[in-house]
C-alpha cells in the first residue's frame, strides 16, 4: 500500500484523535496519508490535503453518512473503503474507534473481507 485517503466527520468529538492515530500508524510504515477534508491543527505534518480518488485504501471516520460521502468522493474508482464508527448505530461503518489499532493490524496482514456494494445514481425531474 502506497497511499491511503481519509474522509472524516470532524464535528464528531472522537474524530481528531482517531484520525491522528490512523495517520501515525500508516505514516510510521512509510505510507502517504491524504485527506479530503481540512484537518485540525497539528495533523498537517502527517496528512496532506488531496482528493481521496487514487488512494489504495480509504478510511471513512464518522457514521454511515461519512461512509456514503467517501464513496461519492471516490467517483468511479474501485478501492476498499473502511468505515470507522465514531458513535451511534452505524450499519455501514463496521470498525469501532476503540478497535481501530487491531483492525489496522489485520488490514496490514491482509486478513479482511470485502463486501461489494451497488451504487445507484438517481435524477428527479419535475
Image (cartoon, rainbow, N blue to C red):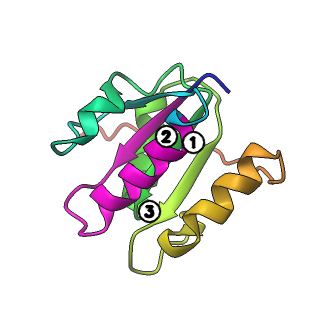
Which residue is drawn at the image coordinates 27% and 40% (left, top)?
43
Mark 1 lies on residue: 119
| Label 2 packing within 10 angstroms: few (<14), some (14-19), many (20+) | many
First along the sequence among labels 2 and 1: 2
Q: Which residue is mark 3?
A: 64
Residue at image location 48% in from the left, 26% down from the top: 75
Q: Are marks 2 and 1 in contact (CB under 8 Å)?
A: yes
Question: Is 122 drawn above or below residue 11 in the view shown?
Answer: above
Q: Label 1 vs label 3: CA separation?
A: 14 Å
Q: Residue at x 67, y 64 (%)?
A: 102
Mark 3 crowd level (few <14, some 14–19, many ≥20, 10 Å Cα): many
Q: Label 2 vs label 3: CA separation? A: 11 Å
Residue 122 in the image: above or below residue 52: below
Q: Residue furthest front?
A: 28
- In-image side of 121 versus 47 (left or right): right
Of circles 2 and 1, which is in front? 2
At mark 1, the secondary structure is loop
Q: Residue 78, position in %: x, y?
A: 65, 28
Kind of element beneath mark 2:
helix
In percent of width and height, residue 121 lies at: 47, 37
Disc 2 designates what residue? 71
Q: Nearer the viewer, residue 76 or 88?
A: 88
First to last magenta residue range: 4-26
Give the residue drawn at x 55%, y 71%: 91
Check if residue 19 falls in the magenta segment.
Answer: yes
Q: Is residue 79 left or right of residue 15?
A: right
Which numbered disc flags the more N-terminal residue, 2 or 3? 3
**Position of residue 92 measured from the top left corner of the image (x, y, whole percent):** 56, 63
Disc on the earlier residue, 1 or 3:
3
Q: Is residue 24 magenta?
A: yes
Residue occupying the far bottom of the picture: 89
Amino acid at each position: 500500500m502506497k497511499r491511503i485517503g481519509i474522509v472524516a466527520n470532524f464535528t464528531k468529538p472522537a474524530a481528531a484523535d482517531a484520525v491522528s492515530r490512523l495517520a501515525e500508524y500508516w505514516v510510521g510504515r512509510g505510507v502517504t496519508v491524504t485527506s479530503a477534508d481540512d484537518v485540525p491543527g497539528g495533523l498537517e505534518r502527517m496528512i496532506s490535503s488531496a482528493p481521496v480518488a487514487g488512494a489504495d485504501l480509504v478510511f471513512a471516520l464518522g457514521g454511515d453518512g461519512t461512509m456514503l460521502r467517501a464513496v461519492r468522493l471516490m467517483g468511479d474508482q474501485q478501492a476498499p473503503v473502511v468505515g470507522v464508527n465514531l458513535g451511534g448505530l452505524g450499519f455501514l461503518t463496521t470498525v469501532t474507534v476503540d478497535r481501530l489499532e487491531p483492525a489496522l493490524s489485520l488490514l496490514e496482514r491482509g486478513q479482511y473481507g470485502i463486501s461489494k456494494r451497488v451504487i445507484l445514481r438517481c435524477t428527479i425531474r419535475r
